[in-house]
Image (spheres, helix red, strand yellow):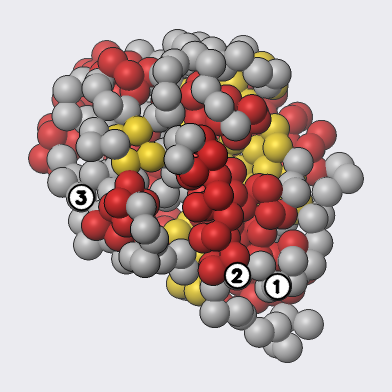
């Protein structure tokens, strides 16, 4: 069927098309399950690192607030909704729209938060991450990895595929640190939720963190869990385990941007047998971002992990907060790419970008009381 599979215009593929088409053909018209692992790292409170919140301090509320929005359609842990400086709404608005259209079941996993959401969630024993400049940033890494693996196997049962996603402010900086510790990248290719990607600041923080942990680039190529323990964040070990546990049973869409590249690198190093049963699912905004390079990054990790991306376009939206995505803000997060791709898949292509955009407008108006 893979040879006969026709990609709809709403989706595009970068990388190994044979693997991507085979993957998509196996789950086309079928129903998946969506997971979002939330976590905090104190790295996000370092001024200038993250704009996934109106202030550095508010970045600690963003993961919990994103989870509350996905489950309840409103936030409880904070007033309003998670926004970037300037009032640009969280990518969770796109995730909410896609999940409503596809009617996928949703599960929140608490990888380790400073602020816990007021909703039911899976608990894996994680704790809020320290700033990576400590060189000892994540607690209970092996425990969270093992529990994530069990959870992945559990959630795979009864579903045709699984989407693994994240909400963890500051996560592109921790991802860069882990990938450099593993040696899968040697330069800063990660993205930012702002068009003003603070690349020099992130590079300096990562170098300080590797020095604090007494790690040289590539030292932990064969020990990704140690790399996460030293300079990662608490979302990572859970999602690494979750993906490995699920991919033994069903195809897995790894929903996210450059943050999830570190997770993919760890997954493949620990269990290369998942190759062929995983793809990265993201957005056009991230793939086309001139200030990062997800394609080069994933290609350097493995040429057998294709990127499938949704061709969302907010340029004609009447709302400036959404138009800002076309100007380089946000781009990805809260699994919005993976959720949107899944809506297209589950409908056998009947749901397209225009239908998703109409639903985004409905969600946007509802949550902002427009």
Give the camera-side residue of 137 and 342.
Answer: 342
Quadrant of res 26: bottom right
**In which quadrant will I find the C terminus?**
top left
For marks 1 and 3, give the CA distance. 33 Å
Q: As drawn, is 23 to the left or to the right of 190?
A: right
Q: Which residue is mark 2?
A: 352
Secondary element type, mark 2: loop
Residue at 66% from the left image edge and 58% from the top image edge: 342
Q: Residue 36 in the image: state x and y as whole percent.
A: 59, 35
The answer to whether the residue labelled 1 contacts the one labelled 2, judged by CB atoms less than 8 Å apart, is: yes
The local crowd at label 3, few if under 14, some if 14 to 19, many if 20 or more residues have their Cα within 10 Å, is some
Q: Which residue is mark 3?
A: 195
**In which quadrant will I find the N terminus?**
bottom right
Q: Which mark is residue 350?
A: 1
Q: As drawn, is 197 to the left or to the right of 77?
A: left
Q: Residue 56 in the image: state x and y as whole percent.
A: 25, 21
Placement of 49 over or under 6, stated as above or below: above
For marks 1 and 2, give the CA distance. 6 Å
For marks 3 and 2, give the CA distance. 27 Å
Outermost residue to the right? 158
The answer to whether residue 67 shows anywhere in this view is no
């Amino acid at each position: 069927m893979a040879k006969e599979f026709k990609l709809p215009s709403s989706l595009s593929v970068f990388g190994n098309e044979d693997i991507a088409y085979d993957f998509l053909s196996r789950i086309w018209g079928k129903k998946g399950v969506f997971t979002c692992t939330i976590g905090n790292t104190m790295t996000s409170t370092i001024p200038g690192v993250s704009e996934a919140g109106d202030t550095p301090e508010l970045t600690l509320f963003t993961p919990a607030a994103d989870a509350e929005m996905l489950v309840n359609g409103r936030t409880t842990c904070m007033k309003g909704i998670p926004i970037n400086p300037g009032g640009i709404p969280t990518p969770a608005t796109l995730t909410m729209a896609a999940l409503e259209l596809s009617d996928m079941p949703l599960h929140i996993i608490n990888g380790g938060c400073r602020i816990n959401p007021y909703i039911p969630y899976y608990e894996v024993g994680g704790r809020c991450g320290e700033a990576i400049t400590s060189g000892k940033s994540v607690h209970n890494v092996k425990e969270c990895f093992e529990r994530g693996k069990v959870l992945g196997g559990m959630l795979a049962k009864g579903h045709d595929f699984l989407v693994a996603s994240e909400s963890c402010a500051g996560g592109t900086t921790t991802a860069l640190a882990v990938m450099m510790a593993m040696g899968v990248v040697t330069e800063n290719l990660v993205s930012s939720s702002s068009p003003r990607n603070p690349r020099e600041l992130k590079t300096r923080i990562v170098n300080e963190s590797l020095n604090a942990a007494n790690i040289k680039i590539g030292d932990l190529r064969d020990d990704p869990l140690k790399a996460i323990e030293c300079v990662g964040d608490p979302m990572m070990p859970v999602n690494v385990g979750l993906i490995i546990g699920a991919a033994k049973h069903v195809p897995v869409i790894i929903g996210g941007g450059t943050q999830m590249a570190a997770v993919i690198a760890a997954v493949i190093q620990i269990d290369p047998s998942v190759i062929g049963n995983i793809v990265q699912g993201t957005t056009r905004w991230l793939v086309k971002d001139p200030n990062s390079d997800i394609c080069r990054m994933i290609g350097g990790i493995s040429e057998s992990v294709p990127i499938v991306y949704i061709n969302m376009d907010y340029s004609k939206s009447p709302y400036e907060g959404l138009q800002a995505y076309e100007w380089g803000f946000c781009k990805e997060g809260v699994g919005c790419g993976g959720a949107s791709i899944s809506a297209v898949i589950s409908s056998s292509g009947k749901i397209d970008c225009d239908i998703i955009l109409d639903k985004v407008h409905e969600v946007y108006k509802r949550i902002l009381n427009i």
